[in-house]
Image: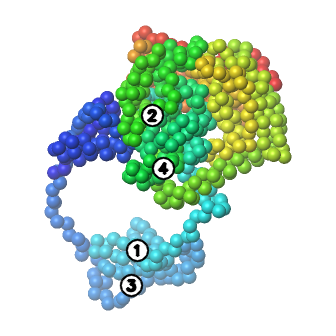
Amino acid sequence: VNVSVHIRYKNTDSSLLVPYVADVKRLTKRFEEKHKQRYGFVAEGKPLVVEAVVVEAVAASENVPTSNKDNINNNNVGRNDDQPVPDREIQAYMEGKMCNSVSIFSISSLKTGDEVLGPAIITEPNSTIIIEPEWKATLTEQQSLILTRTKEKERAAAIGTETCDPIMLEIFNNLFMSVAEQMGATLENVSHSVNIKERLDFSCALFDSEGNLIANAPHVPVHLGSMSESIQSILRNRKGTMHPGDVFVMNNPYDGGTHIPDVTVITPVFAEEAYSQPESSNEAAPLFFVASRGHHQEIGGITPGSVPPFSTDIEEEGVLIDNFHLVDRGIFREKEIVQLLTEGKYPTRNVEMNLSDLRAQIAANEQGIHEIHKMVRQFTLPVVEKYMQYVQENAEEMVRKVIDALEPGSFAYEMDDGCTVRVNVSIDKKERSAIIDFTGTDPQQKNNFNAPTAIARSACLYVFRTLVDQAIPLNSGCMKPLKIILPENSMVNPRPPAAVVAGNVEVSQTITDTLYGALKKLAGCQGTMNNFTFGNESDGYYETICGGAGAGPSFNGCHAVHTHMTNTRLTDPEILETRYPVRLEQFEIRKGSGGEGKYHGGDGITRAIRFLEPMTASILSNHRVVRRVSP
């Protein structure tokens, strides 16, 4: 009889199956070891809940005969031949070469113990088995075929670091991307909040030891180009003090963040042996970093949902987190983070949801660490580090090829409140580089339409990456041919404590459309993320609403999609109505709203939600004023 128990921390959702032992201390230790392995941390002193008990009884059944004599060809049992006789021989192409003598056997002509040497083919009534050269097949008493090598496989030469192999470059492009994708899958599965689990408003990425972006999953563009600055902030402030098991969290828009609700969890990655020998890791430096940025649907501020339309100061937009030590050598500092989230001037309205999302982000980073260690074990550290350099150099060259075909241009984009984003793109054909100059953009605003520098750089990175046809990871190499000029105290480089929540979601869209206009590559999209929030004193909900995409030189824009700097999805109606006291009464395409022309823009949508109890609701948006936009 085997007994196991499902155990979880109190006030969490995810339980772990642990083999039962009567001693509570030993049972707790087993749970903590498994929790640390799965999620990357333990919560010291937090009560445990036994959610379920599993009892499994195993008993012996009657003996099953090891052979079935009726299935053995009796004509062959007494055969004295050393080797079975093939039915015929043919030519066949195997292992990259033509084999002139390939034996074909029928399974019924073989007897127990017969060995068939490759190259050969064995036919059965319902299948065909190919025995390749340097392999053999042996027939067992159960009429099964066991395939074994007859000659040890010759290993290919070790992957070098002196030159870049094009095939290995493509393999590593996908391997690095896969790390971020696996992190994203873990975050989606472990998270409980609607914003992360259903709307997928999160991003995951892999960075080198200097904080350069190596690869990201295709998540939210506005997050990805800015996360490098968050990593580099941790490096500046924590250099020489980081240890295996440490995790940091931040959301400061003036230190690599985007806006307050976008919370970034950063984990340094050390050599695998450092995690099992902590005493030897005191002098070790991180080899890589992994990070996950998720939009917390509630983190304080003057309105539920933490996206206030009328904020004038960063403090009014929620709890500011700057370089906070969230997990200290594997110990989750729950008491300290709760204190930070609940004791400010405008505290969070749902701290348990914040904790749940933070735990999910830590788990996602832990998955990234496992994937990186597995890659290093397979290819060695020098090779992995060298190909991190190569993928950036490849991305740099791809962007330079794009620049080769571009012409200089300028564009000015006036927003609904009259403020304007201006850009001039100049091309240096000799250096194969571009200067993106935002000089002339209006000064920083008293409202919240201010984009931190990380946002402006993200928009530039996104635009130039979309002009590359090849399937390469978006990484820091894309930025090397670009010089970006962001005038101080402007809408694209504000000074703290200016409010910035609309800079992330609205000005970023304006910057993107302005760049496409200057490059003459794409007409303007809906130009807004249509940020809709509602809530009460205990919780909040946030979503961005889809609209029309801009047309191109030879194609129409798409209808009802999230465009450019947002790449989330809308919450399923069933989930929305189950989790919140609302009813979705209308959600349809506004046909014909995309405009006219040889190639027209995509149509927008109509979305109507009815509140079933009192709520505070707000819309933060742009592009509600109709005007002609020209260069």
Distance CA(mark 2)–CA(mark 1): 52 Å
- Position of 443 with respect to 370 (left or right) is right
Up/down of 285 relative to 339, above or below: below
Looking at the image, is mark 2 or mark 3 earlier in the sequence?
3
The residue at which mark 4 appears reads as 284
Q: Residue at x 40, y 41 (%)?
A: 329
Q: Identify the residue shown where x is 50% and y is 26%.
A: 321
| Contact (Cβ within 8 Å) of mark 3 with mark 4 | no
* Quarter of image, res 385: bottom right
Q: Amino acid at mark 1?
A: Thr
Q: Is residue 374 visible?
A: yes
Q: Nearer the viewer, mark 1 or mark 3?
A: 1
Q: Tell me the distance, in whole angstroms, between the alpha carbons under discs 2 and 4.
A: 18 Å
Sequence-first tag of 3 and 4:
3
User: Badge 2 is on which residue?
Assistant: 325
- Residue contact at pointers 2 and 3, CB within 8 angstroms: no
Residue position marked by numbered label 3 in the rendering:
84
User: In this orientation, which residue lies closer to the viewer: 142 or 393?
Assistant: 393
In the structure shown, which secondary structural element does the residue marked by tag 1 occupy? strand
Kind of residue at disc 2 = His
Q: Amino acid at mark 4?
A: Ala
Residue under pointer 1: 148
Cα–Cα gap, marks 2 and 3: 69 Å
Q: Position of residue 555 (x, y in %)?
A: 73, 35
Q: Earlier in the sequence, mark 4 or mark 1?
A: 1
